[in-house]
Image (tube, grey):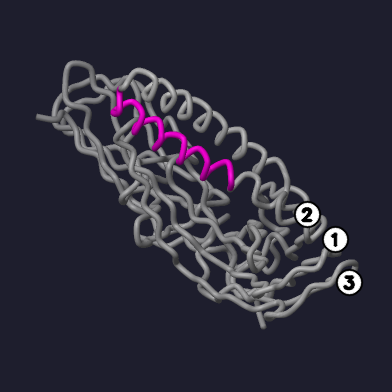
Amino acid sequence: MSKCDLTIVVDGDQIAFQIGETVTGYLQVRVDADCRCDGLTLTQEWSTHGRGNRASGGEQVLRLYRGEWKAGESHSYPFEFTIPDGPVTYHGHYLNVDHYLRAVADIPWAFDPKDERELLVTPSSKSSPEDLPQVGLGAPEVAAAGIPFVYLALFGCMFTIPGLAFVAGGVFNGDWVMAVFGAVFALAGAAVLFMGLRNSLAERKLGPVVASVTPRVAPPGTKLSLALDFNPRSEARLNKITATLKGVETVTSGSGTNTTTHVHTLYEEQIVLRAEGRLFAREAQELAGTLTLPPDAAPSFEASDNHLVWQVEFHIDIAAWPDWTSSTKVQVPALAAAKA
């Protein structure tokens, strides 16, 4: 049996708070038996739950008391803290993010009494994303044949070469199990290798391609301006060029060989930047378009094994030739929807 009871009381019994607001209240302690408290703490933090592995952060710890309590006493310990810059409360398909107040009293040789209260954290009413900390998104323009594709190519080689060695060894030794295993390994590596080299192959016809999205930090409801520029090196037949705005939840559960990734598309909108037709050598292409974030777009979220990402995906579909693709992240801050 616990020697005392804890109750978290928020002033005005308020539940919902905007980012940046101050939370005040007190921690009520009712003592049932004489005891020593080695530490009375109140912690504010966010935590994920859902299909992905649990993640938490933003911890703020208030140490309220250390000392002796007598049976029959009642104490109130005031607290005050500021709601952090994010994340906001979010309840999605695979991902949920909630904020909590958690109180605990460290009582030696007894059960530690605890109490917990959930807070609803909502976007800030500030008018500009510059008013909030921004996540680094890199340069505003993205050349698709960049480092990520090099990594894919190297990763593909790491699978393809050993796979071919297994195939050769299996055939030479008459071990068909080894040969089949090697073939699967090599095919998987070849697929990754192709993904890594695809844009480089596409640019042999297209020339260097530069894609841009502005702004890169945008509240819900913001109109995004898109640009795609290239100067074809040789003639090609074009199926179409598209830009797609996506909001995607991606969460991972388990670890090692038991890892499972769950993906859910929250929002998807596509526009055609250029329809089917012929591309001619040295005929510069300067394409533009707009996509608009939905007014209820959930703020971007990045944590271990839990992600909510907004991005614009560019796709140049070339007939009978490897396609060119690129994606650019858009950071949606925890702000109210942009005004039209």
Say what amino acid the circle numbered 3 marks.
Glu
Between disc 1 and disc 2, whose residue precedes?
2
Residue 181 is a magenta residue:
yes
Circle 1 sits on which residue?
Answer: 233
Q: Residue 125: image x %, image y %?
A: 60, 68
Q: Residue 301: image x %, image y %?
A: 51, 52
- Residue reaching furthest to the left: 1
The answer to whether the residue labelled 1 contacts the one labelled 2, judged by CB atoms less than 8 Å apart, is yes
Between 265 and 126, the one lying in front of the other is: 265
| Label 1 crowd (10 A; few <14 / some 14-19 / many >=20) | some
Between 125 and 213, the one lying in front of the other is: 213
Determine which of the numbered discs, if any, sits on residue 204 in the image: 2
Check the image and report above or below for 85 versus 107.
below
Q: Residue at x 62, y 38 (%)?
A: 153
Q: Residue 314: image x %, image y %?
A: 66, 64
Callout 3 secondary element? loop
Between disc 1 and disc 3, whose residue precedes?
1
Say what amino acid the circle numbered 1 marks.
Arg
Between disc 2 and disc 3, whose residue precedes?
2
Check the image and report above or below for 42 versus 301.
above
Determine which of the numbered discs, if any, sits on residue 102 in the image: none
Circle 3 sits on which residue?
Answer: 283
Residue 260 is a magenta residue:
no
| Label 2 crowd (10 A; few <14 / some 14-19 / many >=20) | few
Q: Residue 152: image x %, image y %?
A: 59, 40
Between 46 and 66, the one lying in front of the other is: 46
Check the image and report above or below for 253 versus 172.
below
- Residue reaching furthest to the bottom: 340
| Label 3 crowd (10 A; few <14 / some 14-19 / many >=20) | few
Callout 2 secondary element? helix
